[in-house]
Amino acid sequence: MTEPTHEFTDGVYGWITHTDFASDDVEATRAWCADVLGWSFRPPFPTGSGDYHLFAYSDVGGGGIRRTAPAEQPGSTPTVHVRDTHAAFAHAVEAGAEPVTPPTKIMPGVCTALVRAPGGVLIGFSGPTD
């Protein structure tokens, strides 16, 4: 199986372009989203913690559904499209966010990070890798 890749889109920096869903029943969530919301899905790809189901709801927006991690509640995390994940992460922490996951290459061309903004909200950043 070919590893997924991603090309970033100019003009949408600062937009929420990916939403990560943690689900206790991935197949049921996927089927519901396809039926009720009309989202299209790519074939799932394996990760270290199980299959990840990528979906699209527009030309520039989508996300993925994965199994809920141990000690995690089902839910969703918005991810903001940034030019530089390292810079966005550093700026967020300097501005008072709690670091959760430092900038990490997740697939060819994609680096993500996660912070907990003041007030407790999880926010992801996604940008091109160096």
Image (spheres, helix red, strand yellow):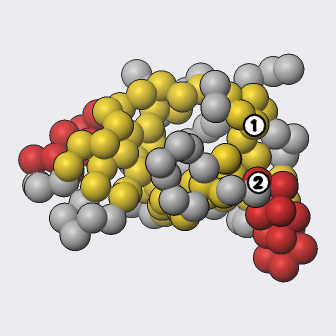
| Residue 110 coordinates in the image, percent (x, y) | 52, 32
Please say if 53 is above or below 11. Answer: above
The residue positioned 67% from the left and 47% from the top of the image is 66
Disc 2 residue crowd, few under 14, some 14–19, many 20+, Cα 10 Å = some
Q: Is residue 29 something that shows in the picture? A: yes
Q: Is residue 100 left or right of residue 26?
A: left
| Residue 28 coordinates in the image, percent (x, y) | 83, 62
| Residue at disc 1, secondary structure | strand
109 and 118: which is toward the camera? 118
The residue positioned 78% from the left and 33% from the top of the image is 45
| Residue 10 coordinates in the image, percent (x, y) | 50, 50
The residue positioned 72% from the left and 41% from the top of the image is 52
Q: Is residue 84 something that shows in the picture? A: no
Q: Quadrant of residue 15?
A: bottom left
Q: Could you say which disc has been placed on residue 51 in the image?
A: 1
Q: Is residue 9 left or right of residue 102?
A: right
| Residue at disc 2, secondary structure | helix
| Residue 33 coordinates in the image, percent (x, y) | 79, 69
User: CB of mark 1 within 8 Å of CB of mark 2?
Assistant: yes
Q: Is residue 18 left or right of residue 12?
A: right
- Report which residue position mark 2 lands on: 26
**Which quadrant would the C terminus be assigned to in this image?**
top left
62 and 115: which is toward the camera? 115
Q: Quadrant of residue 21?
A: bottom right
Disc 1 residue crowd, few under 14, some 14–19, many 20+, Cα 10 Å = some
Amino acid beneath label 2: Val
Q: What is the residue that sits farthest to the front in this orientation?
A: 71
Label 1 vs label 2: CA separation? 9 Å
Q: Is residue 36 left or right of residue 54?
A: right
Q: Could you say which disc has been placed on residue 1 in the image?
A: none
Q: Upstream in the sequence, badge 1 or badge 2? A: 2
Amino acid beneath label 1: Asp
